[in-house]
Image (spheres, rainbow, N blue to C red):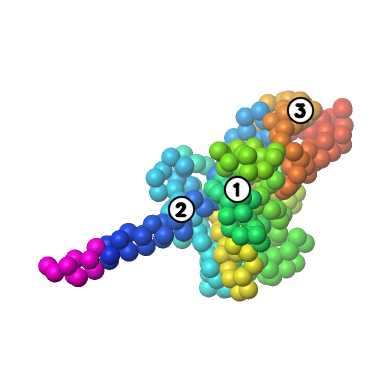
Amino acid sequence: MDVSRRVARLLGFHYLLLLLVVLHARVDGHSWPDDLTCASGPFFTDNPTKGYIRNFVGRQSTSVDVDTTYRILQIDSKTPVCPPGRTSPGQNPAFPKLKATPGDLVRAQYLENGHIWQTLDGQNGPKAKSGTIYWYGTQNPRADRDIASVLKWTRDGKGGDGQGVLLDTTPFDDGVCIETGHENVQKGRVGGPCKSYFRLPSTAKAGKDYTIYWLWDYSQHFGPKPGYVEWYSSCMDISVVDKKSAKNGRRSVEAREAQLLAEDSAPTKGLNRHLRREQLREEAQGQSKKNPWWFSY
């Protein structure tokens, strides 16, 4: 084999290797809700039971990034809102769905995987943004539901086809979390998962699952680029239980709130950690001493 052909083959191999690395980097290390827990209501305990997204394989799986990351580059009626293989309800037995009661505050945890610290560190450009999370919900799930129709839903339930609602909108960056090992990127940052919250509607019907669509708009991670679209989606189902049927340890709201505030000792900014504190205080102050909510069932 002459030298020119040998060099060409060698360069071709290196190019292929580089291409595989780049393609892997485009899906590896993205984010999704790792777990859900109740942050109020009967299932809010010292050690609340976790719920998970559809068919979650767990962080211990070597294929978790590929299996869980769903990248959306076009917002239209042809793009499913849920990842392939997860358009219909289904759970890995090791990772069940969350149980909650109507009106419960739900907390989701996710890893930032560099999407926050690299932005704060200036690595993605001066106008880069880590994005926004949209929580949508419905008790009328469909396997053929597309992202364009979901994004038309509104808080009052009258938007789009009227089959669902916008539950909450929060920044991807909760103002506190950071990837472990990068805490020094900004004062007050605490290594560990990020947290986001939404409230299950009080009108949710018990005995019927409530489907949640987690949509993350990451289109401006390198700054504004007109027309550029990059979203990520995860879908999950919550088993809605009647409050009278829900059981948990009978522990005072004040005691649980005290522990909560101690755990969230980082600065109160970003997302709605502050909202969680206020909601819990309101629950504590608004309950009758004679009939506290945890005895209502």
Quick one: which residue is furthest to the front in this view?
3
Secondary structure of residue under mark 1: helix
Secondary structure of residue under mark 3: helix
For the point 56% across and 59% down, which residue is it? Answer: 232
- Where are the magenta residues, as a range? 1-10
* Nearer to us: label 3 or label 1: 1
Q: Position of residue 116 (x, y in %)?
A: 61, 50
Q: Quadrant of the N terminus?
A: bottom left
The three-letter code of the residue at mark 3 reads Ala
Q: Position of residue 140 (x, y in %)?
A: 62, 60
* Nearer to us: label 1 or label 2: 1
Q: CA distance from mark 3 to mark 1?
A: 30 Å
Whether the magenta-drawn stretch holds residue 5 is answered as yes
Q: Which mark is residue 117?
A: 1
| Any part of residue 138 in sight | no
Q: Is residue 159 above or below residue 96?
A: below
For the point 77% across and 62% down, which residue is it? Answer: 156
Q: Quadrant of the C terminus?
A: top right
The three-letter code of the residue at mark 2 reads Asp
Tell me the residue that label 2 is attached to.
28
Tell me the residue that label 3 is attached to.
258
Q: Position of residue 227 (x, y in %)?
A: 61, 74
